[in-house]
Image (cartoon, helix red, strand yellow):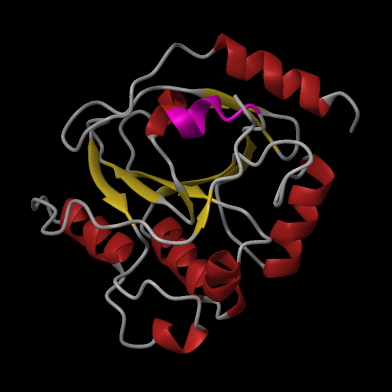
Amino acid sequence: MKHLIPLAAAFVLAAPAMAAPQIGSPAPNFRLVGMNGQAVSLDQYKGKIVVLEWNNPGCPFVKKHYGSGNMQKTQAAARNAGVVWLTINSSAAGKQGHMDGAAARAFVAGQKAQPTAYLLDPAGTVGRGYGAVTTPHMYVIDRAGRLVYAGGIDDKPTANPADVAGARNHVLAALGEVAAGKKVSVPTSRPYGCNVKYKDS
């Protein structure tokens, strides 16, 4: 696994400079290394609906959604609908939530998570480029490659798993509307959770 971090850095450095995208604008392409050492680019999923999820397993708000099974259920529903789900970890080395490929594989297996890929962004280039500020922070990209949703997974900004019941799942709502050819009715919401543990600049 020693080769993964330098390899990840190389791919991140190869990514183009990005500005935080706005709703309705093209989602910037990126390329990162996944937990299995594979290179993954956003543009390889051109023509598909894509969800981006920022992840930090040590964050209580992330634990709320994984411990309750809510995130896994949302991932399963999305993937069953043909949606690509990319989980991204932008925690820097030495900070909460930082993982190498082996740790990421253990997390995914232990949580029975179902992302299409779990991607490592230790330099924080992609996270900062998308303006990701919390874990989780969710984005939905439509088939045309435009950002159509950015914000929280739902409308209950707490770390209490009991609040999952009755919450409006903004991601599933957006995916349903996009699949139906409708405009996303709630295109933005306040992201909530832990601050992304970026590398000090």
Dividing the picture into quadrants, the one containing residue 59 is bottom right
Front residue (pair 72, 123): 123
Q: Report the number of discs.
A: 0
Q: Is residue 15 above or below residue 101?
A: above
Indicate left or right for 54 with 101 as reference: left
Picture residue at 39% right of the left edge, 33% below the top: 130
Q: Is residue 126 magenta?
A: yes
Give the answer, above or below, for where 152 lies relative to 156.
above
Q: Main secondary structure of the magenta part?
A: helix
> Does the segment drawn in magenta span residue 45?
no
Q: Quadrant of residue 90?
A: top right
Residue 150 drawn at (x, y percent): 29, 48
Horizontal side of 8 relative to 177 (left or right) equals: right
On the picture, is 193 further left or further right than 171?
right
The image position of residue 32, as x and y in percent, is 60, 26
Foreground of the two, 36 or 121: 121
Residue 149 lies, in percent from the top left, at: 25, 48
Over which residues does the magenta segment extend? 123-128
Task: Locate residue 158: give its quadrant.
Answer: bottom left
Quarter in which the N terminus is drawn: top right
- Identify which residue is drawn at 57% across, 10% down: 14
Work out whether 3 lies above or below 14: below
Answer above or below: position of 63 versus 33.
below
Image spot of residue 47 (x, y percent): 30, 32
Return the residue found at the far right: 2
The residue shown at (38%, 87%) is: 165
Query: Residue reaching furthest front?
Result: 201
Q: What residue is drawn where x is 59% and y is 24%?
A: 201
